[in-house]
Amino acid sequence: MKIVNIIQRYPPAVGGSETWCQEVCRYLVRGGHDVKVLTLDINKEEEFWREPLDHERTLAMGRLAIDAGVIVRRYKRSLPVHSLYHGIYKTILDNQLKFYFYGPHSIEMYGRMWREIKRADVVFLHTIPYPHNYIAFLLAKIFRKKTVIVPHFHPTHPHYERKSNYWLMRNCDCVITVSDYEKDYLADNGIPYNKISVTGNAIHPEEYQSENLDLFKAEIYKKYTIGNTDKIIIFIGRKTREKGVANLIEAVRELHNDIPIKLFLVGPGIDWYENLYASLSSEDKKYIIDMGIVSHQDKVNLLKISDLLVLPSQYEAFGIVFLEAWICGVPVLGTTEGAMPSIIGEEGFLCKFGETVDLKSKLIEALGNSENLKLKGSNGRQKTLQKYTWDVIGMKAETAIGAAYGK
Amino acid sequence: MLTILRNDTKRIFTGFFELLRYIFEREEISLSLSLFSTDSHNSQIGKTSAFELTLANNSNEDLWGRILFDFYRKDNPIHPDDHLAYFEKKVFVKNRTNQKIVMHYNWQEDARFEIDGVISEPDSTWHGNGEVSGKYQVFAVLLNETGKTVETLTIIQSITL
């Protein structure tokens, strides 16, 4: 099949949907398909609306790349036109018609799409609510091409919850979701159930090997005075209110006198978090440890010495960090929100978002039974190897695309 | 307000005609710059910066590409006063593959090129006489056989003493 993908960015630009697109495209190429990606020549999301600042300009993307056989054509992003943005996109399309059309736009990409879509068999659309999906869908209909969309839908988010987005998904030949939760949600909102295929998300297991773990562990134990009976909890993610960091810190503070706990907080912080962490006493900071952003290898080593990964978020579309923990043999604790229950299943624990008392009781339950912890971690690893590698996800996507093409 | 409207109208019309051009114009890209990057925004005179460039050959034939790394002061990119240096190299790229080129430059001496682990000198160079410290635009330029620019990528690096 000739498959043309349309997406707002492509790696090395960092993002969940971008990585998903890259890995699936690489798999499709390995399967003998002719795969092309049409995307924009930008690195960070902020560049949808402005040129990169001087200090951000350490990386520039060119017109064409060959990524493991995938042809990636990058087009110039068109900067917003003031009167179109405020007069048409905002006042008429958004406020009156509830249609998200702000951007990013690319005149070059929209023009070139004509020929690219004309010679494709399948048009693969990525990531709602960006307008490239509508332009590509329209061209696909003109040329009578099959359309597949992977929306990476965020329920309740105002940019996603638009009739126009549901209309688009209803009219595509196939909708691919990354979780059962996303599938059920879309089906409940009018997308035909038999049109939706679930693939999932994935990691590369081979990238999660520890390096010099004994030395790393000895240094960490010494630096943070960790005893052999201490329980190590790790949080990995953006440290925002929505990720439940405040509840986790509160729960650990309250439990600390009863259970010897060390909490590692890994990931970038925002001002809100910096203020929160600064408000902790120096005593608290001895067992609630801010690690900031760490290298991938340090993250793997930290996971390998941890007893439990906790991500008490308000919402996760999938939660790749759960797979990262599992592949290192570490059990996980998430919340009952979003896709987490369907992803975590029996291989972890669930608490209610924003309820510190419930989080505390789940931490006590988890940390109180070492054998059960090890079993859940080990089962999580098996589940990841069976269900959440890129070969598995790519195969599911290929099956879904093939079914849509054969319709 | 009137100025904004006038500018916007001009951009909309220009965009419309560009759109038509892109629709009707046939596109064939054989050799292209894929990615140009450096580790840090900041560097020092005497400290070697590594500039990494990936060149993609999308054709069925092996091709030679002429690559130019060009250093201009950001605020006034005019030759020769604020033109620091350039380094040119001819690079072979096999069909349907990428070729990575790393240029090592310490902001004082000639740059060195690293291709597939082999270090070599530039094919041609030029050096200006101006003050080195400051903010620089670093251009990676793909030239055709006649020396005409085919594609340019730009990054920015700040240099201190």
Image: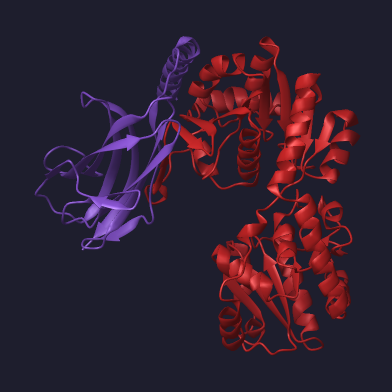
User: Which residue corresponds to the image point at 41% horizontal and 17% vertical from the top-left?
Assistant: B10
Side of A236 relative to B132 (left or right): right
From the viewer's perspective, is residue A1 above or below residue A273?
above
Q: Residue furthest left?
A: B129
The relative height of residue B78 versus residue A119 in the rendered view (above or below) is below
- Quarter of the picture containing the C terminus of chain A is top right
Q: Is residue A384 above or below residue A286?
A: above
Would you identify the image quadrant in which residue B54 lies? top left
Identify the chain drawn in purple: B
Q: Is residue A316 left or right of residue B126?
A: right
x, y percentage for residue A306?
A: 70, 75
Q: Is residue A123 left or right of residue A259?
A: left
Between B82 and A295, the one lying in front of the other is: A295
Where, quadrant-wise, is the N terminus of chain A in this rendering? top right
Q: Position of residue B22 (x, y in %)?
A: 47, 15
x and y percentages locating residue A262 in the rendered image:
70, 81
Q: Nearer the viewer, residue B71 or A176?
A: A176
Residue A350, picture quadrant: bottom right
Look at the image and tell me whether residue B92 can be seen.
Answer: yes
Chain A, chosen colour in render? red
B157 vs A64: above or below: below
Q: Is residue A162 visible?
A: no
User: Residue B70 occupies which quadrant of the picture?
Assistant: top left
Name the residue at 76% across, 85% down: A256
Q: What residue sits 73% from the left and 58% below the top?
A: A323
